Image (cartoon, helix red, strand yellow):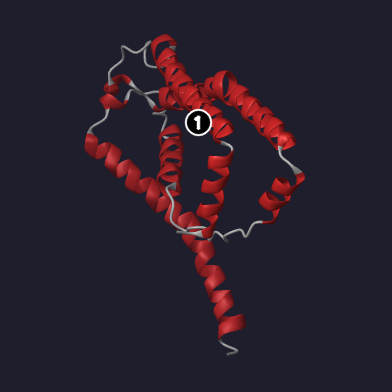
Amino acid sequence: MDCSNDFWSKKITQHWKAFLVFVIGCIIALAGAVLVLFWFIETSDFGAMGTATIGEWSLAWIWGFIIYLIFYELLIIGIPAAIAFGLGWYIFWKRLSDGEKAEIKGREKKKHRGSSAGGGFGFFMFIAFTILMYLRGEFSTPLGNFQYSYLVYTWFTALGWLLLIGGIPAAIILILVYFTIWKKK
């Protein structure tokens, strides 16, 4: 077992009441977030108050739904939860003895290496697809009006534009690096 895991499992057993309050707070925040999602689906004009079919959705509805949902989640759940958890941590920290505070601050920390893999490409492609559909004047057109092949071809067109926009500067940089750094070696 990792020494960092031993450290935290020992701290959790020492302060099990505070840990239990933290877990209950997380469960309440998660349940609240799900309830806000259900409330927003049922009362929002985006999606016709929960009655619209997938084919009736447009990119304008999707973006509006996402932006307003994030706003309401932050306003109703996120900000109050952050304040409550911050206040709880402050109270917990103030009640710790100086020895425990020094032990927490001085523990051996594991260095985390960031992973280069991620899910950002799909979101980036969605943004590019949305911009392309906007430029074509089809931002508010229901997605059910398009043939599937048209949406696939539009996705590949957006990918081509991204590769073109990102590939030309990358090629220029690689050529410059080759002639200035690598060729000298």
Q: Position of residue 126 (x, y in %)?
A: 41, 40
Which residue is more in the foreground, 15 or 179? 15
Q: Quadrant of residue 53?
A: top left
Q: Nearer the viewer, residue 128 or 110?
A: 110
- Measuring 60% from the left and 82% from the top, which residue is drawn there? 181
Image quadrant assignment for residue 154: top left
Q: Residues within 10 Å of mark 1 (few under 14, many from 20)?
A: few
Q: Is residue 51 above or below residue 126?
A: above
Which residue does the image show at 39% across and 29% down from the upper left? 138
Residue 99 location, x and y as percent? Answer: 73, 48
Q: Percent from the top left, x then y, of residue 17? A: 56, 30
Quadrant including the C terminus: bottom right
Kind of residue indicated by mark 1: Val
* Quadrant of res 37: top left
Percent x, y for residue 165? 49, 55
Q: Going by the image, does 71 lie left or right of 60?
A: right
Q: Residue at x 51, y 21 (%)?
A: 68
Residue reaching furthest to the bottom: 185
> How many marks overall?
1
Q: Nearer the viewer, residue 58 or 87?
A: 87
Relative to residue 161, is residue 129 depicted above or below?
A: above
Furthest toward the front, the residue is 14
Left or right: 58 with respect to 63? left
Dot 1: element:
helix
141 to 173, vertically: above or below: above
Q: Which residue ends up furthest to the right in the rendered image?
A: 98
Q: In percent of the image, x 27 and y 23: which residue is there?
A: 55
Residue at label 1? 23
Quadrant placement of the N terminus:
bottom left
